[in-house]
Image (tube, helix red, strand yellow):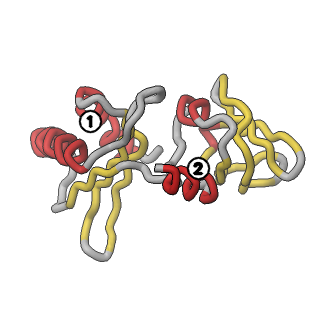
Amino acid sequence: MRKDLQDLWMLAEPHVRDAGFDLIEVENGREPTGWIVRLFIDQPAGQGGGVTHEDCERVSRDVSAALDVADVIPHAYQLEVSSPGLDRPLRRERDFARFVGESTRIRLLEGVEGRRNFSGTIQAAKDGRVEIACDGRSYVLPIDDIVRANLVPDWEREFHNRSAS
């Protein structure tokens, strides 16, 4: 993880946790509208419900105050806090373990067996590695080598869940 993102993560995570949420991802960069610091938060594993607009506002206020005091960003920026969405990012071992059995896309920096891109089903996550069933076989990928990993939404299940509500 880049140093600036790591610093933002370390600063924001206690405030997110105090509000009762898990910090899922931190993004920081220049976009067409200017500099953006984006936090994705979610309910801890095993807790029902989602993230409300009010939850995002509360976390935003707390993290914004902490960022102002720490003064770690040397330019103007906009802070955004949101839920991770259906294609949520996966970063830590516990993220992968929470979603065993789900579909994912993973991109590695160095790669495994000459391959850097994987699309398949999460089989397990332990000891700093994630096991993924992909193309009829199983691969064990080092989590430290993952550049980007996201869940792949099961749209049929989502449409079924929404129509049953």
Query: Residue 32: x, y in percent?
Result: 31, 76
Name which residue lies at 33% across and 48% down: 39
Give the CA separation, mark 2 to mark 1. 26 Å
In the picture of the structure, the residue carrying the numbered disc 1 is 11
The mark found on residue 151 in the picture is 2
Name which residue lies at 66% across and 23% down: 127
The residue positioned farthest toward the top in the image shown: 127
The total number of labels drawn is 2
Left or right: residue 24 compared with residue 62: right
Left or right: residue 31 compared with residue 120: left
> Does 78 appear above or below 149?
below
Res. 115 visible in picture: yes
The residue positioned farthest toward the bottom in the image shown: 32
Res. 152 visible in picture: no
Which residue type does callout 1 highlight?
Leu
Q: Which quadrant of the structure image shows residue 51? A: top left
Name which residue lies at 24% across and 31% down: 19
Which residue type does callout 2 highlight?
Leu
Q: Nearer the viewer, residue 116 or 119?
A: 119
Q: Nearer the viewer, residue 106 or 51?
A: 51
The residue positioned farthest toward the right in the image shown: 136
Estimate how packed mark 2 is, as few (under 14), some (14 to 19) or many (20 or more) residues with alpha carbons within 10 Å: many
Label 2: element kind:
strand
Name which residue lies at 11% across and 45% down: 68
Name which of mark 2 and mark 1 comes first in the sequence: 1
Q: Are marks 2 and 1 in contact (CB under 8 Å)?
A: no
Query: Residue 77: x, y in percent?
Result: 20, 60
Query: Residue 147: x, y in percent?
Result: 58, 50
Q: Mark 2, mark 1: which one is toward the viewer?
A: 2
Label 1: element kind:
helix
